[in-house]
Image (cartoon, rainbow, N blue to C red):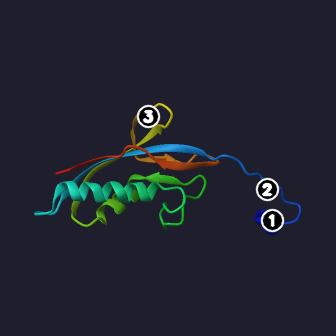
Amino acid sequence: AAIEERRTVGVAVELGTPYYQGVSIAALVRTLPGRPAEAVRQRISEALTELVHPLVGGPDGTGWEFGQDLTVGAVSQVIESVDGVLAVDEVQLFEFDLRNRKRVGEGRESVRLEENALFLAAEHRVVVR
């Protein structure tokens, strides 16, 4: 009912179940001296999950625009902003098969959000040294 009240006259609104597009991030990170590696790794994993979140993720924290790319540059910026991180040595992005719970293909520099899809974070691997 709320949508009906707000839609433009003559425009059809179609609602359906979203298609979730899995994405997994692998990162190799160095910590500042004296920082507990496990705590930094946990904060990075949480920040990556939030970045990929379909509603509160994205570059500006308001969700992902359809057709927008997730890039190594955006991921690196998020990791660098985590307390305790000295440097990001490597980042790779992987498409992730949510049904079979495995990465698909080789690591890449960007992942394009497919039409009518929402990103869903899946099994990030963060190595901290």
Q: Percent position (x, y) of residue 72?
A: 38, 52
Instruction: Residue type at mark 1: give it.
Output: Arg
Check contact, mark 2 vs mark 3: CB within 8 A: no
Which numbered disc, 1 or 3, marks the residue that appears first in the sequence? 1
Q: Percent position (x, y) of residue 45?
A: 33, 54
Q: CA distance from mark 2 to mark 1?
A: 8 Å
Q: Percent position (x, y) of residue 89?
A: 24, 52
User: Please, what secondary structure does the residue beneath circle 2 have?
Assistant: loop
Q: Which residue does the numbered mark 1 point to in the structure image? A: 7
- Return the residue found at the far left: 34
Quarter where residue 66 is shown: bottom right
Q: Callout 1 environment at 10 Å: few (<14), some (14 to 19), or many (20+)? A: few
Q: Which residue does the numbered mark 3 point to in the structure image? A: 101
Question: With respect to residue 12, does 107 lie above or below?
Answer: above
Question: With respect to residue 67, does 94 lie above or below?
Answer: above
Q: Which residue does the numbered mark 2 point to in the structure image? A: 13
Which numbered disc, 2 or 3, marks the residue that appears first in the sequence? 2
Residue occupying image coordinates x 64% and y 48%: 116
Task: Using residue 13 as the reference point, say whether residue 45 is left or right of it.
Answer: left
Which numbered disc, 2 or 1, marks the residue that appears first in the sequence? 1
Check contact, mark 2 vs mark 1: CB within 8 A: yes
Residue occupying image coordinates x 43% and y 59%: 50
Check contact, mark 1 vs mark 3: CB within 8 A: no
Task: Using residue 64 as the reference point, say whether residue 74 is left or right of it.
Answer: left
User: Please, what secondary structure does the residue beneath circle 1 have?
Assistant: loop
Residue occupying image coordinates x 88% and y 65%: 9
Residue occupying image coordinates x 52% and y 49%: 119
Q: CA distance from mark 1 to mark 3?
A: 38 Å
Instruction: Residue type at mark 3: give it.
Output: Arg
Q: Callout 2 environment at 10 Å: few (<14), some (14 to 19), or many (20+)? A: few
Q: CA distance from mark 2 to mark 3?
A: 33 Å
Which quarter of the figure is the N terminus placed in? bottom right
